[in-house]
Each structure stands twice: as structure tokens, then as C-alpha cells.
Amino acid sequence: MVDIGATGRTARAADRNAGAGIASLKSPVDVRPADAVALAEYEAFCASALYAPPQNPVWVRAWIGATQADAFVATVDRDGRAAIALVLEVVREGPFRIARFVGGSHANGNFAAMAKGSHEPLARDEYRALTEAIHTARPDVDLVVLERQNPAAASVPNPLTNMATMPSPNVSLAVDLSGGFDAMLTRRNGKRKRKKYRLQLRKFEDAGGHRLFEAGAPAEVERLISEFFVMKAARFQERGITDVFAPQEVQAFFRDLFMSALEQPRPPFFLTGLEVAGRLQGVNGFSVMPDGVVCEFCAMRDEDLGISPGFFLDYVAMEQACADAMGIFDFSVGDEEYKRSWCDLETWQFDTLLPLTGKGRLLSAWKIARAKAVHRIKSNAMLWSAVKRLRSRVAGAKPAGDD
């Protein structure tokens, strides 16, 4: 397994070593509310910038519109031109106020928007200027929490690499598609996977036939996303996990996200569905990167078939990604057995915590300690399996949504 997240773990040491050579770089930072003008400027900047899907203007507008987020745009200039831009939202966490990437826990694989030709990560005094500018503009914010950041995108280092505080506690898994679909299968126990694929095809046909389709119209988006919420809620309840898709504003966001994506020349977000005998059995939600595709979420209904349609959806999605000349199929954050059966790339993303107040320093210390504990638990296969079993048992005695 290749670890492509080492950059984040060594970022702070690299910054210390390079400090003397970058001390003269002083870049102005602009922080302003995410109003219509600021979002229009951000969208114009992103037209020629590199960024992760959750920093896509389509995502940003959909989230702010659905949640009425208290958001702001922070821009770092170099040589009088915008070089790096972040759209953050301010939320309450108990007695604290934190600033985070818009989308909260739904924003994974983050990579701040970065102008082409400006691929140097933030220098020490640049991120000090960024921190000071945010504190000046938003003195109510205690802590900036930038989680689940990819160390690179399209071979370009993350602009916030030198601001890394710690590795994220959850690994992100992906499949190397180089050489095409047949080559990828050869590396990943292809004979067995082809046999399983053919077996599922026979089961689907015996059940009444199947149809795999991409939502290309608003009515199809509405159907797939609505069914996804129902399937996912049932799955979360079964496992004793809080349903992060349950809030009405979150559901409104995803509806708007995939509806708005249809209006783009090349949709950056799309849904696929699998019907068997006319009944929807599975839904996958994807985002598109410059060099790959990300499976952001999935949900299955397998009680009627005796075999999960998840494998089938993954198989055909990777086959299509290869046909589209994609280099990576990313399963996003989370370590699951079905992902491991495909994946040969693992990324340890990084988190950035920037305390702005005394309260923020206390919260930062607690978050770091908690992240280390989570990482230890999830790194121990026996302990993590025990935790999941316990969670599932407890779920039967608790209302849906309790954790």
C-alpha cells in the first residue's frame, strides 16, 4: 500500500528549515463576508485555479444557500494578484466558535483554491498574516479548524501544507487506474472480481433485469437523492451511527448541489443509480477532480437480492472512470473492508488548527488529544471491530440518530 500523505506529516519540519529563506515574503490578506460580490470574485478566481470538489463554487454556493451559513472569504495575494482563497463558515461548538471549510463533515479531501502558476505553499509569515487577518475580521472566532486536507492535488502540493498541525485520524483510500481497467483488475485479483461481476449480472437478470443510469435531469436527481437519504438513514440506524444526512438543511444542500451541477458544461458532481426489476437498489454520489473521480457517498438496498449491489456499482464506476481516462478512483475518507479489496493507494490527510483566542487554545488541545485517541483505536483492528460491534448492539436500544 502506497502512502501518499507523507507530505502533511513532514510539513511543519520543512517549514522550520525553510524559515530563513522566506522571511522576506509579506503578502496582503483580505477577509470579507461571503456576500454576492465576494462569491462572484471567488467564482472568477476558481475559473483558472486548482481546488478540491468541496471548494468548488457550485458546492460553496449550494451550502451557503441551503444552510444560511455565516461564511467569509479569505484571500492571500502574491505580487498584487490573488494566489490562494478559502471560503470558511463560522459555527458554534458548545461555548466556542470555530471557522471551518464550508460543508463541515461532508467536506472531505479539502484543498484550498490555488491560482495556476502560484504553487508554492504558504510561507510562515503568509500564514501568520492569514491568521491575524481572520482574527481581526472575526474576533468572535476562537479556533480555525481545517480538517481532512489532501496533501496534494494533481501532483501540486496543498497550499496549506506548511500549516499542518497533525495527520487526520481517518485514512483515505483510492485505486490507481493507470494502464486502464484490465491492468487495474490484473493488479487487484481480477479473475475473482470478473467472476463476481458476472454472478451479479445473472442474479440481476434472474430478478427481472437491471438498469444502471446517471441522473441527467432534475427529476432523476430528485428521485436518486431522496432514495439515498432513506437508504442511508436505515443503514446508519442499523449500525448505531448518527445520520449526518438527516438535517433538513443538509438534504436541501445536496439536492441543490446535484441540481446545480446539471447546469455546468461538465458537471463536477453527479449521481448514479442501479435499478433491479424497476426498483432502485443503490445510489452513488460522485465528484470530479482534475485527475480522477471521488465516490463521495453510497447507499444500498440489498434485502431483496441476497447479494449487495455495492460491488457492482463500484466495478462499473471504475470501468467508466478508466474509459474517461481518469488516473484515480477515490473512495474518500473511511477505512472499510470493501474499499481495501480494491485500493492500492492510501492517503493520510492532515488537519490544521489555528487558535485565535485563549478559549481556542484549550479547544485545540482537546481536539488534538481526541484525534490521537481516535487514530489509535482505528489503527487497532481488533479494538475497532469491537467498538463497531458494541455500537451496533447499543443502536437497537436507542432511537435512530443517537450515537
Image (cartoon, grey):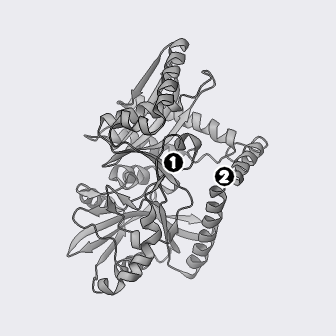
- The reply to whether discs 1 and 2 touch (Cβ–Cβ < 8 Å) is no
Tell me where residue 87 appears, x and y as whole percent: 38, 62
Foreground residue among 362 and 349: 349
Quarter where residue 121 is shown: bottom left
Determine the image quadrant of residue 138.
Answer: bottom left
Around disc 1, counting alpha carbons within 10 Å, would you say few (fewer than 14), some (14 to 19), or many (20 or more)?
some
Give the image location of residue 176, x and y in percent: 39, 45
Instruction: Work out whether mark 1 precedes mark 2 in sequence or the reverse, and give the earlier one.
Output: 1
Q: What residue is rendered at 54% in x and 35% in y? A: 299
Report if residue 146 is visible in the image: no
What is the three-letter code of the residue carrying label 1?
Glu
Looking at the rendered structure, which numbered label has been put on residue 381? Answer: 2
Q: Which mark is residue 249?
A: 1
> Residue 158, image x and y in percent?
36, 64
Q: How many marks do you count on the picture? A: 2
Q: Horizontal placement of 316 versus 325: left or right?
A: right
